[in-house]
Amino acid sequence: MELAKRLDRIEEPQTIKMAKLGRELRAQGANIIDLSLGEPDFITPEHICTAANEAMQQGYTKYTPVAGMPELREAICEKLKRDNNLHYNPENIIVSTGAKQSLANAVLCLINPGDEVIIPTPYWVTYSALVTLSEGVVKYLPCSIDTDFKLTAAQLEAAITPNTKLFIFSSPCNPTGSVYTHDELAALAEVFKRHPQVAIISDEIYEYINYSGKHESIAQFEALKDRVMIVNGMSKGFAMTGWRVGYLAGPKEIVQACEKLQGQFTSGTNAIAQRASIAALRSNLSPTEKMKEAFRQRRDFVIQELSKMPGVKINNPKGAFYAFPDISSFFGKTDGTTTINNDEDLCMYLLHNAHVSTVNGAAFGNTQCIRISFATSMSNLEEAMGRLATALAALK
């Protein structure tokens, strides 16, 4: 049977590939520490699980509206007003099966063959794959560790062309942990004001994992609001990765287009998970704050340990739960058996020699770095950092 050629345009995400390789080695008896996946190691808070149990008992086991339960869409509007001072109506909200589907909906509804999409690098692996599936053209804008992996207004201005249709970015960022300040977003907003044909997808899934203070959204700039699509969800801030609930907030016409598309793919999101999400959004954020504080302590430890390793260059991530060190100084080095030629070689070396699973930076658009997730226990991180230090010191 001949498969569709569109599959040739994309590859399996490296994040999933490395996690899979780690599981295979673990099944063979290796003691693998997985620092590849971005999944909080906390269980979903009890009050959210209770709401799910109550939902089942109350009969919330049927199909749901494609765009989401009205009460959840209302709760999302309340959250956006409370936390972000952004005013949306339920007609501006669509609930999907995870933030990834929200992203897919938006890109597929906007991009025609040949349309140009600007993506600052490093970026989350799925952005470019979605553009490719839409037959759009990706224009990458490299951002280095020296600028905290953030895009400048001058870079953006120079990159936009009459064919530019869309800009996609995240803050806090996966994989770098970089967080855009109000002033940095304001500078980008001034550029976008001069180019009204460019729509903006702002991936804010790590909003609550922010160590630098108040989260800032580019949707706060009124001149842009009618072309900004905020993508967010329950996975990271509420430890609800397996519940698969995401949402998009944006212009009514985009939401309606996404609803039309989603109606042919998945229809409405799981009813029980939606009821649990209502409870999460309308309750206090103390469990989220406790998780963030644990992540902050892990961040501080990981950055401190990486900083001690000769040859490793690291920034201090202000959000999310990743470190993205520059490891290019190890290229060309060997332990006598394995020679490191690139970031993928180093990741495979660390997997097989240190039994620590990471992700190569090329997957995120930067071949000089690797991604290390610290969304795991402190005991795992302590052991992993010791292993990494030993393995890297063996490279001469």
Image (cartoon, rainbow, N blue to C red):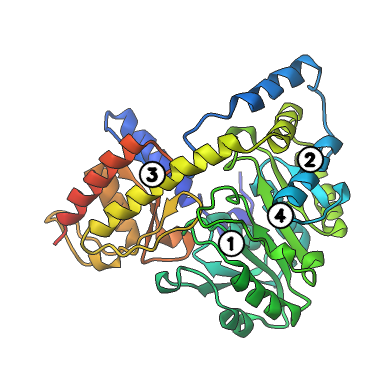
Q: Amino acid at mark 3?
A: Leu
Give the CA separation, mark 1 to mark 2.
Answer: 31 Å
Residue to which mark 4 is pinned: 84
Secondary structure category for the residue under label 2: helix
Give the CA separation, mark 4 to mark 2.
Answer: 13 Å
In the rendered image of this protein, does residue 139 appear above or below residue 311?
below
Q: Amino acid at mark 2?
A: Ala
Contact between labelled residues 2 and 1, with CB atoms less than 8 Å apart: no
The answer to which of marks 1 and 2 sits earlier in the sequence is 2
Where's residue 89, x and y in %?
86, 50
Determine which of the numbered discs, if any, sits on residue 128 in the image.
Answer: 1
Q: Amino acid at mark 4?
A: Asn
Where's residue 215, x and y in %?
62, 56
Give the CA separation, mark 3 to mark 1.
Answer: 23 Å
Residue shown at 67% from the left, 61% from the top: 217
Residue 268 visible somewhere in the drawing: yes
Judged from this view, the residue extending furthest toward the top is 57
